[in-house]
Amino acid sequence: MKFKAGIIGYGKMGQTRHQAINELKCAAITAVSEPNLKEELEGIPNVSHEKIINHPEIDAVIVCTPNFLNKDLTIRSLNAGKHVFCEKPPAFTAKEVEEIKEAEAKSGKKLMYGFNHRHHDSVIRMKEMIDSGSYGKVLWLRGRYGKSVTEDYFNQWRAKKELAGGGILLDQGIHMLDLFLYLSGDYDVVKAEVSNLYWHMDVEDNAFVILKDSKTGKVASLHSTMTQWRHLFSLEIFLEKGYMVLNGIITSTMAYGEEVLSVARNRSTAPAATWKDEVLTKYVSNNSWRYEMDHFFSAIEKDTPITIGNSDDALKLMRIIDAVYQQKDF
């Protein structure tokens, strides 16, 4: 093993990251920090956050904690000379991300964020086709991402603004906004309607967001919801010479259905495209966790920049989320 790493937060995400690292054999997990660990890990001590951050033999810290801890643990780890991989969201606001970037610059270490959807094979394929230019410029995007929750959600940290920072937008919609930026570039106009009509928590249960690039005119539309009684993931991208529609996303429970990418080119005569014109690709394996960890540890090993999910990406994203929450009226 080339590197030694510690995982802070060993719930579902910490365990998922550990599994991917083991499969890749890119690092050895030498310690975890989890106050609610259900059973001891063989040969891996469960220690305090501080011990992982300041351990002289640990090269990288993987942060998989509730949202309110992300900024502090990231800055402390960078200041201690560690490379850091942190789950989303990076912080609660763009200003806080700027503070993180200052610590990153001083440390000279790698910092990567867990914008996991970028690493799905379907999204990688979409990115390749868009960047090739063969489908022309992006005209518009429409993303819908929703799930249902039960009343026990009220007892979870995600339902409390001081711990989560926000509701469904910061929990799940952030992934779709990130895909908008990754696949189609920047936006400078943000309009939003944010509500909590059903669950009546102090965080939102629905967010409708419209983004516009005033230079090109392209528009992106997001509906992020926790009142989607049947889980849904759908991303549509329409370009000058065709379209790409991704329905479903592979998860451990397959609650969002199969991951199927539909692609078709425009035709010059009506109808522009028919169902028969579509090329369908069904993705049956989720390689994203391995791809993500490989990108992080490869950047450390080769001393190359983080190009997928870096702090610049995080800052752009949080500026948009700031603009959305500024339009919240509850």
Image (cartoon, rainbow, N blue to C red):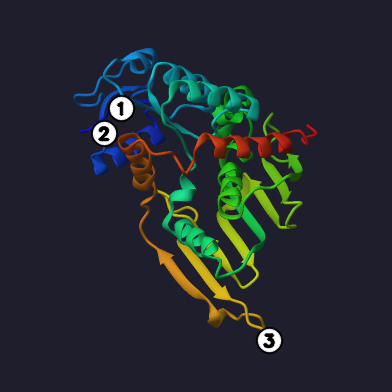
Identify residue type, mark 2: Ala
Answer yes or no: do the residues labelled 2 and 3 have beta carbons within 8 Å? no
In the image, 159 versus 221, the foreground residue is 221
Where residue 242 sits, quadrant-wise, is: bottom right
Which residue is found at the position 38% from the left and 19% from the top? 81
Q: Residue at x 20, y 33 (%)?
A: 1
Is residue 127 in view? yes
Residues 81 and 90: in front is: 81
**What amino acid is found at the position of numbered circle 3 in the picture?**
Thr
Q: Pointer 2: what residue?
A: 27
- Across and down, in percent, residue 112 comes to 45, 35
**Disc 2 to disc 1, how far (Cα)?**
7 Å
Which comes before the other along the chain, label 1 or label 3?
A: 1
Quarter placement of the C terminus: top right
Q: Secondary structure at mark 3?
A: loop
Tell which circle, 2 or 1, labels the residue nearer the N-terminal end: 1
Q: Position of residue 54 (x, y in %)?
A: 35, 14
Mark 2, Cα crowd under 10 Å, few <14 / some 14-19 / many 20+, is: many
Q: Position of residue 298 (x, y in %)?
A: 33, 40
**Relative to 102, residue 292 above or below:** below
Name the secondary structure under disc 1: strand
The residue wearing badge 3 is 269
- Tell me the tag on residue 36: none
User: Is residue 149 at all visible to an observer of this figure?
Assistant: no
The numbered mark at residue 5 is: 1
Gap between marks 2 and 3 measured at Cα: 55 Å
Determine whether label 2 and label 1 are within 8 Å by CB: yes
Q: Would you identify the image quadrant in which residue 198 lies?
A: top right
Quarter assignment of residue 77:
top left
Above/below status of 130 relative to 114: below
